[in-house]
Image (cartoon, rainbow, N blue to C red):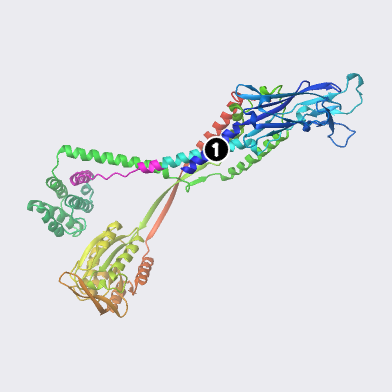
């Protein structure tokens, strides 16, 4: 902020400096004289502080340039000497020193006048020159030079030669008024000042807004309230009446499982009925409620997995039973407490919507989706600088003259009105630029994508035996395998993926789902020791095949990862492979472990910690190869982290998902804004030139 105020101070100082200005000019008693006539010439100085004016010099007036055409001369210019009528005789200097006492104060201004009587003894039209003024340049902003008058010197009418060809040129054609960059410096100061003020205001508002946007703590609705709404919707849909019994039962069991998770804090969505009942015993779950829960979940399992077809009225009866179950097991709160929670939830959602809208308004810039329908019209913008240059050049070469009989007549030269007149061309050109942009038809592209994906079903089978803690990978085989599996999942956004783990026994950690976040969370939570130790490859493969047997996907894949030899379980690996082949499941097998020896767990202490030692790496590669060949898959061996990453990448390449993407474009036309701005600027410029800022030619 200190730089911001420093720049503002500089601009303020420049504006004060420009206020310390000096104006000087010449007036004459006659504009047309006969040769030999005397002219009274008055030189005037006007300023706010007389101490800044030091002296002036009349020598520029000694020789005047004539503006007549005369065939006797090759050049169009010749000069005449000024007769001062004895004012500067005896070598007297034409430089006149000034002090404060030479000025006369009128209001807040000081005036100085010097009168001279001169003669011009050559015929012609002469432009008088201003005396050279010496000022203290460090204390003033600008010196204004008023337009000097023209004096026509003619011969008496009785001696004029009628055959002369000398022609006096029109005054309007010979007056020039040069302008330079400093004349427009105040505009630059103004624009820079406005830019800095605007930038400072934007930064201030942005920081304030960022401080104001605080995400509130979420308000969670009671579990029974959510379940009742879902059950009401399920009843209104009446899927069983449309023959969608399986879909109805799947939704019913999902609602009840989700209610149990929210109400009792157990993992119900990914657990079996027995596991759920076992977990609820720690929450003083009654036998009556346990029986109702078993009936609700078992009828759903029968429909989903055993393909049972219960009578139509059974579906509605079990829906009523689910409603009663939720009502009887809900947390008991008063109606007032429930209303308070609902009001808080409504206020939270309203505040969240406001924050979202505010954030989008402040930080969303659709520059990447902005285009012009007719971009060639933008080439017309190149004509605007050319038009500006031609107008400025014409104005600097040719301008009209206004005679000022005395200095006081130009008091309004630097008024606000005069300065506003200089802005009129800017308004006109800005309006024209906006109209040209409107012609180019700017528009925002709003894209919509319709993705049709034919995904495949994939079951990841992960070995959790203690040997997976071997340290030939960094930090160990299990950690690296989990991370590589997560990366593989991220590359398969349109596939259903499940997770089966095995050691001495097998367990379905996650059924097939498109919610990959859940699968990755389960992967993160995997630890060696969750199951009885051992390597039951057949059990793990059989569990995966069982999960895929009801899949309706055209492509079903199992990725089995292990680091040992089958030594547990009651299902042989090749038997499980035969089952997989029968249901068209392709099995990719991965053997994890370095060649030779590795530091691995060799025993376990009473406190549960493993004792590590050097042991030989043994992987039944022959078995894994046979399983993959039988099912149409492929066997891979990963001896390090990079090798395992390449294997997952190769499997990803082999099992591609067919995706059809249709892109639809909608456009939001933005040309109306530019059209309105352009017409507004041009209309305002015309209105001002005809009224308040009207000028006469």
Tell which of 235 and 66 is nearer to you. Answer: 66
- Identify the image quadrant of residue 165: top right
* Magenta stretch bounds: 207-236
In this rendering, is residue 410 above or below 618? above
Residue bearing the label numbered 1: 11
- Assign the magenta stretch its main secondary structure: helix
User: Which element carries disc 1, helix, strand or loop?
Assistant: helix
Tell which of 625 and 178 is nearer to you. Answer: 178
Residue 311: image x %, image y %? 15, 51
Judge left or right: residue 511 versus residue 416: left
How many tags in the picture?
Answer: 1
Judge left or right: residue 230 versus residue 401: left
Residue 275: image x %, image y %? 15, 59
- Identify the image quadrant of residue 651: bottom left
Judge left or right: residue 483 versus residue 112: left
In this rendering, is residue 542 above or below 288? below
Q: Assess whether residue 230 is covered by the magenta stretch.
A: yes
Give the quadrant of the C terminus.
top right
Residue 194: image x %, image y %? 52, 37
Q: Assess whether residue 330 is covered by the magenta stretch.
A: no
Tell which of 408 and 321 is nearer to you. Answer: 408
In this rendering, is residue 404 above or below 677? above
- Residue 376 in view of the camera: yes
Residue 536: image x %, image y %? 21, 72
- Identify the image quadrant of residue 184: top right
- Residue 552 in view of the camera: no
Q: Residue furthest left?
A: 287
Judge left or right: residue 554 versus residue 607: right
Categorize mark 1 by other alpha carbons within 10 Å: few (<14), some (14-19), many (20+): some
């Amino acid at each position: 902020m200190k730089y911001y105020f420093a720049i503002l101070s500089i601009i303020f100082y420049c504006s004060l400096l420009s206020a310390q200005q000096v104006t000087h000019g010449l007036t004459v008693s006659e504009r047309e004289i006969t040769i030999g006539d005397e002219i009274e010439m008055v030189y005037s100085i006007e300023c706010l502080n007389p101490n800044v004016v030091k002296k002036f010099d009349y020598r520029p007036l000694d020789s005047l340039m004539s503006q007549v055409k005369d065939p006797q001369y090759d050049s169009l210019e010749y000069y005449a000497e000024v007769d001062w009528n004895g004012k500067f005789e005896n070598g007297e200097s034409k430089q006149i020193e000034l002090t404060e006492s030479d000025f006369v104060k009128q209001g807040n201004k000081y005036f100085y006048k010097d009168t001279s009587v001169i003669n011009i003894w050559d015929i012609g039209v002469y432009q008088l020159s201003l005396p050279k003024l010496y000022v203290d340049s460090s204390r003033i902003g600008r010196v204004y030079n008023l337009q000097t008058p023209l004096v026509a010197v003619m011969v008496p009418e009785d001696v004029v030669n009628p055959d002369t060809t000398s022609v006096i040129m029109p005054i309007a054609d010979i007056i020039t008024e040069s302008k330079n960059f400093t004349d427009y410096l105040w505009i630059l100061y103004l624009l820079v000042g406005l830019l800095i003020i605007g930038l400072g205001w934007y930064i201030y508002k942005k920081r304030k807004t960022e401080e104001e946007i605080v995400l509130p703590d979420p308000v969670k609705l009671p579990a029974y309230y959510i379940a009742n709404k879902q059950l009401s919707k399920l009843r209104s849909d009446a899927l069983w009446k449309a023959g969608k019994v399986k879909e109805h039962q799947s939704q019913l069991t999902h609602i009840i499982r989700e209610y149990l998770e929210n109400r009792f804090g157990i993992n119900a969505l990914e657990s079996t009925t027995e596991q759920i009942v076992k977990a609820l015993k720690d929450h003083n779950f009654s036998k009556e409620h346990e029986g109702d829960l078993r009936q609700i979940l078992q009828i759903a399992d029968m429909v989903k997995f055993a393909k049972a077809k219960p009578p139509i009225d059974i579906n509605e009866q079990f829906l009523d039973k689910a409603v009663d179950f939720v009502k009887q097991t809900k947390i008991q709160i008063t109606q007032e407490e429930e209303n308070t929670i609902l009001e808080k939830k409504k206020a939270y959602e309203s505040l969240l919507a406001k924050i979202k809208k505010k954030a989008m308004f402040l930080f969303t810039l659709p520059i990447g989706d902005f285009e012009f329908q007719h971009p060639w019209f933008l080439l017309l913008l190149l004509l605007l600088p050319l038009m500006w240059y031609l107008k400025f050049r014409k104005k600097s070469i040719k301008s009209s003259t206004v005679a000022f009989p005395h200095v006081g007549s130009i008091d309004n030269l630097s008024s606000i009105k005069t300065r506003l007149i200089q802005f009129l061309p800017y308004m006109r050109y800005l309006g024209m630029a906006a109209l040209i942009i409107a012609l180019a038809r700017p528009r925002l592209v709003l894209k919509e994508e319709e993705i049709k994906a034919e995904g495949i079903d994939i079951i990841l089978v992960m070995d959790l035996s203690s040997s997976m803690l071997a340290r030939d990978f960094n930090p160990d085989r299990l950690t690296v395998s989990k991370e590589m599996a997560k990366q593989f999942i991220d590359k398969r956004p349109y596939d259903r993926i499940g997770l089966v783990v095995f050691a001495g026994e097998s367990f379905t950690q996650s059924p097939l789902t498109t919610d990959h976040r859940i699968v990755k969370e389960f992967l993160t939570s995997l630890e060696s020791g969750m199951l009885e130790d051992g390597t039951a490859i057949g059990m793990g493969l059989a569990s995966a095949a069982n999960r895929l047997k009801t899949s309706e996907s055209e492509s079903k894949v199992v990725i089995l990862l292990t680091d040992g030899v089958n030594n547990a379980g009651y299902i042989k690996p090749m038997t499980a492979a035969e089952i997989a082949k029968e249901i068209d499941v392709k099995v990719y097998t991965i053997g994890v472990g370095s060649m030779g020896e590795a530091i691995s767990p060799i025993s376990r202490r009473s406190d549960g910690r493993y004792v590590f030692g050097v042991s030989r790496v043994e992987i039944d590669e022959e078995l894994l190869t046979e399983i993959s060949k039988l099912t149409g898959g492929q066997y891979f061996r990963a001896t390090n982290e990079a090798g395992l990453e390449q294997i997952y990448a190769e499997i990803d390449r082999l099992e591609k998902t067919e995706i059809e993407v249709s892109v639809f474009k909608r456009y939001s036309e933005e040309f109306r804004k530019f059209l309105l701005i352009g017409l507004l600027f041009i209309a305002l410029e015309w209105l001002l030139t005809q009224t308040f800022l009207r000028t006469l030619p």
